[in-house]
Image: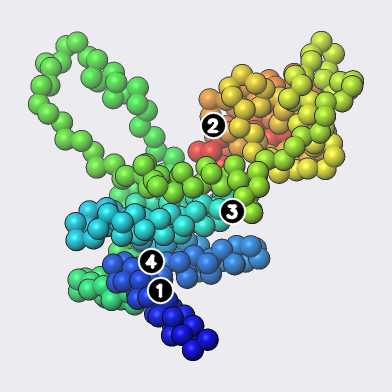
Amino acid sequence: MPTTAPAAQSTSRRRKNSSSRRDDDAPIIPILARKVREVEAKSQRGKLGPTNRSKFQVIAFLVREERARVKADTDVTDATRAELLKRLDGVATILAKTAARDTSLIQLLEVDQATSPVAKRMRRDWLLESGAELPPDELIITDRVPVAAPVVPAAVSSRQVFPPQIEARREANPFLPPDLSRKPHADTPRRRLDGWELMGPLYKAFETGAGGTAASMDLPPMPEFDRLSPKGLEIMPHQSRFLEAVRHGHRSFLLADEPGLGKTAESVLAASVADAYPLLVVVPNVVKMNWAREVHRWTPQRRATVIHGDGENIDAFADVFIVNYEILDR
């Protein structure tokens, strides 16, 4: 008995030393792990406000920065590097599951960097807490945002367009001498989801739910009779099972069928089964008229209106309002 306690203390001491050595190699990781748990807890309670959304954004950027640093660090062993990357993957997985729960968080990753003063302060404070040395320009953060003087009135600039056909017509003019000089490439902002390591855990979060179970639910069996298709049309078995789930009361779905399997028809009929009218459909511009045709085809008793421009000619008594992303804010 007297030898057990020292042995246990020695084992505990070795674990603490091992943990401290890991934290010495990447002291920011424990901070990120603690912060991401705070965001996850708030998300589970449905209280993800502006502060926690900024936390999510800063955690995601720091995970990516730390991953790149660990991969490029030649002073750590391969085993330590693998352990650190594994811990970063754990943080990324929690981020992915949180983003799967609230998909509006994904758009926070599209900006080039966390530019708000709140996000900058969070990043600065967390890095200082980890013992990192920051340059002077990152230590002083102001709330003042430079305002550029508008060249044209805002009411006009919001409607200005430069059709790509004009540029194409200029370049295709046969009477102009060829311009063989190398044109400088425009500095297009890099999209944060390009090669983003978060996408792997995010896709996995769609497949795997809490506790490691499957995130997709089993659909009801196909009903014996098709009472939903209009005369002359017939729905496919997978569509019939999906609509049966809607009839049973389910309302949130992620339709990920391959092209040609009738996702538009499923959505139109699902709205009819759920009596979800008036229905707002936000789609790319090129498929607006196709959606109007599908509404008339599968639910001929419903009226659809396609919103163009400023929506001056909108049919206010329609059942389905179809608009594209670009003019939604108008």
Residue denoted by label 1: 15
Quarter of the image for residue 29 reads: bottom left
- Locate residue 107 relative to residue 311 in the image: left or right: left
- Image quarter for residue 27? bottom left
Mark nearer the viewer, 1 or 2 = 1
For marks 4 and 3, the one nearer the N-term is 4
Disc 1 residue crowd, few under 14, some 14–19, many 20+, Cα 10 Å:
few
**Mark 4–mark 3 distance (CA, rounded to whole Å):** 24 Å
x and y percentages locating residue 143 in the rendered image: 35, 72
Give the spatial CA distance, label 3 vs label 2.
22 Å
> How packed is label 3: few (under 14 Cα within 10 Å), some, or many (20 or more)?
some
Which residue is labeled 4 in the image?
A: 29
User: In the rendered structure, which disc, 2 or 4, sits on the residue that comes first in sequence?
Assistant: 4
Query: Secondary structure beneath disc 4?
Result: helix
Percent across and percent down for residue 21 are: 31, 71
Q: Is residue 184 left or right of residue 106?
A: left
Mark 3 or mark 2: which comes first in sequence? 3
Residue designated by label 3: 102
Residue at mark 2: 284
Question: Disc 1 and disc 2: Cα gap in Å?
Answer: 55 Å
Q: Is residue 178 above or below residue 274?
A: above
Foreground disc of the pair 3, 2: 3
Residue 217 lies in quadrant:
top right
Give the residue displayed 62% in from the left and 50% down from the top: 212
Q: Nearer the viewer, residue 48 or 195?
A: 195
Marks 3 and 1: which is nearer the front? 1
Where residue 280 appears, x then y in whole percent? 68, 39
Q: State the colouring used for the structure image.
A: rainbow
- Tell whether label 2 touches label 3 (CB within 8 Å): no
Does label 1 or label 2 sit earlier along the sequence? 1
Q: Amino acid at mark 3?
A: Asp
